[in-house]
Amino acid sequence: MRHKLVSELAAITGGFESTFTRGHLWDAGLRSRLLTPYRLLDLVMRRSLTYPRLRCLVGGADLREQDYITPQRIRRGYSVPMPDMHQISRYLRDGCTLVLDDLGAYDPTMEVTCRALQWELNERVQVNAYLTTGESGGFCLHWDDHDVIVVQVAGAKTWEVRPTSRAYPMFRDSDPNLAAPEKTLWTGTLNAGDVMLIPRGHWHQATRATHGDGYSLHLTFGFTRRTGIDWLTWVADQARKTATFRRDLDAGDIAANMAALVDMLPRFISDHAPVRFTEDHLTASVPERHIRTHGLFGTPFSVVCITSRKPRITQDGNDVVVRAAGKGITIDGSARPALEILLSGRPVSVDVMREVFGDDMTELVDVLLSEEICAEVTPELADGYAGLVPEITTQQEVAQLDGALAR
């Protein structure tokens, strides 16, 4: 999936290497295309949100949820929590940090951007938005258990980054890792268009202190890389399928039970090597949220692959097997060229696919929609791709992509 922001981030970070990196987006139009303060506040205003999905910090400390979220009574007597925009506007005027987590759940542009990053990284990606006004600070000095890519969308903010105080720290760990190192790795200001990758475990904090009036808006794309602990957890889950591992340790002949476990474990681990874990990780994800109309409002004009990882297409004799969204489907091998295009991550015109590959495309598209590997491109979803991921709308574009994939 060719996504403008992801391509630039890959170039800046050296292919998303887990090392502290700074750079700048060369395409200035990307910033406003991703998010603006107005769009963020509009997203907040129109949704029922609660803490910690929506947070408001003043002086680096969380406000109480009831200070900026109030129940809105509905005509029939029940109420729903809604952001109090009057109160939020006062905090913004006086200086605060407004945080909206998991922006991809609400905004199609962020949804598509996270999906493109997931295809690139083969890891789950979440994006959070931070709007800071006046001279307010954000979170105090801390470290994250995941890598973070910071994209400064607008305004400016000063950062301090320190190295790790523990190698490869984890959220659930044997050491609380509470002491930050004295050494400073970098201190400076991120201005609009600046990018920074902060690897897991690096201590950091951000503030607008000394900046005076104005604001900062930045996005953080967070992703947790797989570890040996994740592999061992997966092995333990696979062991649940075997009666020997499920048996009570103290049932019957305890010594025999222990011996059976000790004997089986090396072979079981060998049969469930990290390469198998990786394969399962890439294909076992659940279907993404999407709209399915079943043609109630007309035949879809275009479709797009929505899996959280790039589908894997393998040859199996005269057939091809598509593994994605936690399932595997077998399709006649003659459809592979069309499949490669439909699963490219780019919105594809259904009519153009029929013109190039014939009427069989109707059946193929229906299969991909039914299996929740592809989804209809609604006007709202199309907005998430516009200007960031090129849509395939002509026979020439199909031919060009077909030729590129063949090479």
Image (tube, grey):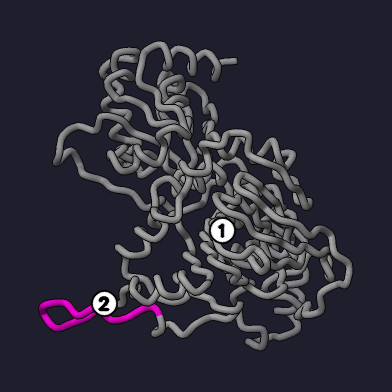
Q: Position of residue 387 (x, y in %)?
A: 44, 32
Classify residue 239 as left or right of residue 14. Answer: left
**Please, what secondary structure does the residue beneath circle 1 have?**
strand
Q: Quadrant of residue 244?
A: bottom right
Quadrant the C terminus occupies = top right
Q: Please report the residue visible at 46 percent of the width from the left and 41 percent of the height from the top.
A: 33
Q: Is residue 337 above or below residue 290?
A: above
- At 49% across and 74% down in the image, what residue appears? 94
**Callout 1: 10 Å neighbours few (<14), some, many (20+)?**
many
Q: Which mark is residue 80?
A: 2
Residue 257 visible in the picture: yes
Tell me the magenta residue range: 68-79
Q: Is residue 124 visible?
A: no
* Left or right, 39 with reference to 57: left
Amino acid type indicated by mark 2: Val
Going by the numbered disc 1, the residue's amino acid type is: Ser
Q: Which residue is mark 1?
A: 216
Q: Is residue 143 above or below residue 293?
A: below
Q: Position of residue 361 (x, y in %)?
A: 30, 23
Q: Nearer the viewer, residue 100 or 407?
A: 100
> Rounded to the nearest whole Å, what is the CA distance between mark 2 and mark 1?
30 Å
Q: Is residue 392 above or below residue 227?
A: above
